[in-house]
Amino acid sequence: MLRCSLCVHDERTAKIDIIDGRPICRECQVYLRHPVDRERIRAELEELMKDVDRAIVAYSGGKDSVVALYLAKEVFKVPELEAVMIDHGLMAGEAIENARRIARALDVPFTVLRYDYSDIFREALLKAESPCRRCSKRTMEKLRKYALKNGYKYIITGHELPFGHHPYRLMSGGVVQIRLLSMMTEGERLRILERLPFEFPELPGYTTNCLVLGPALERYWEKHGHSFEQRRIAALVRYGLMDRERAERELARPTVPEEQWRLVMERLGIDLMP
């Protein structure tokens, strides 16, 4: 099986061509023609943050949103911050505790908004699909409405990948989403976490906050034979934000504890126990 020499794609997940004797996937070919300039994106981000005086942080209690909150408060010194968690009904208890503990340590107000996303999760598990895109889209819309209602212009998120070649995007209503971790390496983020009272939950899959991700990945693996995180993690490797060895571990088929499966199934009212 051909494997891309630049990222972690293989023939299951991307078209791969032999170029100058090397297997290179189509996504990496686009990147080679239009490389993402890490220094320019980080410089643009720092310039943008000079104007941010009030913002909410999309705060899931996972490691990336925790790093985003720390940067907003301690590095960029945003004068008025609010950490806002969207609890979709299947957040890990450890993530909620991490969120509370770190918001308190950083002296940032912490707000939890609770919603029921069981329709998204139930459909994804029944169809062996990824729930992540629909979950993220719904969450960002709820945060956008919260920002408008409370007079915030900026929403800071913990995404590592920029919007193309920029670390921000304009949402409807004039709200600006800022991906504060744009082009930040895995190592840089982990070093920041070492300064904080963050405790890593033992959750299967590439997550430190979500109970449904592991079961969804297992179901997807059964149907497709690979992870639905493949494209995103391939981009992290391509951009030099994660090493290949770590990426391969994150993309491995997860083993979800029976207790976690049972909890998710009970909350969703379905029976897909492996």
Image (spheres, rainbow, N blue to C red):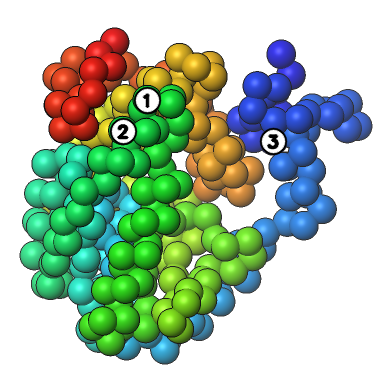
Give me the residue at 43% from left, 82% from top: 173
**As displayed, is residue 130 above or below residue 104?**
above
Where disc 2 sits, the SS reads helix
Q: How far apart are marks 2 and 1 (CA)?
A: 6 Å
**Mark 3 = which residue?**
6
User: Which amino acid, mark 2?
Assistant: Arg
Q: Return the disc, 3 or 2, that comes first in the chain's sequence.
A: 3
Judge from the rendering whether residue 47 lies leftward or rightward of residue 13; answer left or right: left
Q: Of the numbered discs in the image, which one, if any, rests on residue 126?
A: 1
Amino acid carrying mark 1 in the image:
Leu
Which residue does the image show at 33% across and 58% down from the upper left? 139
Residue at 32% of width from left, 88% of height from top? Answer: 53
Give left or right: position of 44 versus 262. Answer: right
Q: Mark 2 points at which residue?
A: 122
Q: In this view, does 32 lie above or below 149?
A: above
Q: For the residue marked with disc 3, what is the amino acid? A: Leu
